[in-house]
Image (spheres, rainbow, N blue to C red):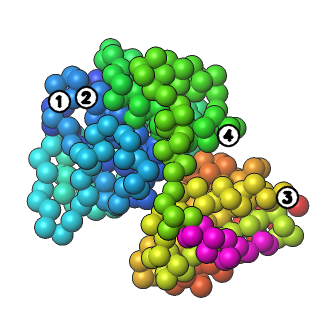
Amino acid sequence: MKLTLDKTAEVLRGAQRIVLTAHVNPDGDAIGSSLGLMHILREMGKEVSVIIDDDIPSIFSILPGIENIQKTHENMQEVPADLLVVLDTALDRIGKVQEFVKAPVLNIDHHITNKEDKVRVYVDAKRAATCEIVYELAKELEIPFTRDSALCIYTGIATDSGFFRYSNTTPFTMRAAAELMEYEVMPNYVSEAMELKSYEVVQGMAKALSTMNVFHDGKAAGLFLNDELSASIESTEGFIDMIRVIEGVDVAVLLKCKAENVCRVSMRSKRTDVSSIAMSFGGGGHIKAAGCTLEMPFEQAKKTIIEAIDQALGQQG
């Protein structure tokens, strides 16, 4: 059931024990919206926990409350809750969280590919980040920002807009970011933290670049990290940006092994609708930024995604 913003706020008001979650392979918006909403709801006196079925990249350690994020595990007990809030994704990308949280679901997202219709859902594809929706919810709930909530929300907005460089950046994006800066949020503090990489990760970047494959007459480029290489790299955050900027490249893709016969795909584009490619494999995202998971061996996954991108680019003539 589709909700309006005010009805979404009403659902949050009506719950006391709330669990927040986001998609696997969490990025700045997934983590920022989860922690930002956690701070807002705790200001309202709610009992709030955050559970994400994946590891949290160390670059997000600057975010207040990061230590509150739990990861699912085999011995985890069912978590009592009145409401499970799924942020920045549809339900099919939250991993095992629903096995441990049997509460009614509220889905809050900004991805145009989110077609969820079995739960209460609020989707606003005009927003550059789910954190922009969390920003609006704070206003609707009449909860003042604190430095903690502002820093988390700002980080999600900044990272999902490419630090205000991507085409999804709107006047609303800039106004929201400017207001959040009034709460002692320093843009350089966030950007420097997000850019920080360990020596090992920089070495991994060099190894990843050695796998680069340019195809479709130079209109597409990919990094393809097999199981051994994926296991040796702590984080691939920002890797796709290294090839997205190649002159002539429209579509950039990063393929990496997550587990045996499980490969994750991230795509960025300048013109091509990569969300349609992702959706064909059960994924989603935005027209110019999308991802999916391919449950197949690495070489098969590499061949499959290259063929899909070739087909999409070919249809453009």
Q: Which residue is mark 4?
A: 166
Distance of mark 3 from mark 4, alpha carbons? Answer: 17 Å
The 10 Å Cα crowd at callout 2, few under 14, some 14 to 19, many 20 or more, is: many
Distance of mark 3 from mark 2, alpha carbons? Answer: 46 Å
Task: Identify the residue at image location x=54%, y=34%.
Answer: 188
Task: Identify the residue at image location x=45%, y=26%.
Answer: 185
Q: Which residue is mark 1?
A: 46
* Residue 248 numbered tag: 3
| Residue segment shown in magenta | 203-215
Q: Which residue is mark 2?
A: 41
Residue type for callout 4: Tyr
Task: Identify the residue at image location x=17%, y=30%.
Answer: 46
Q: Is residue 142 visible?
A: yes
Answer left or right for 47 relative to 2: left
Q: Which one is in front, 88 or 259?
A: 259
Per the image, label 3 sits on a secondary structure element best described as loop
Per the image, label 2 sits on a secondary structure element best described as helix
Q: Position of residue 222 (x, y in %)?
A: 69, 69
The 10 Å Cα crowd at callout 1, few under 14, some 14 to 19, many 20 or more, is: some
Per the image, label 4 sits on a secondary structure element best described as loop
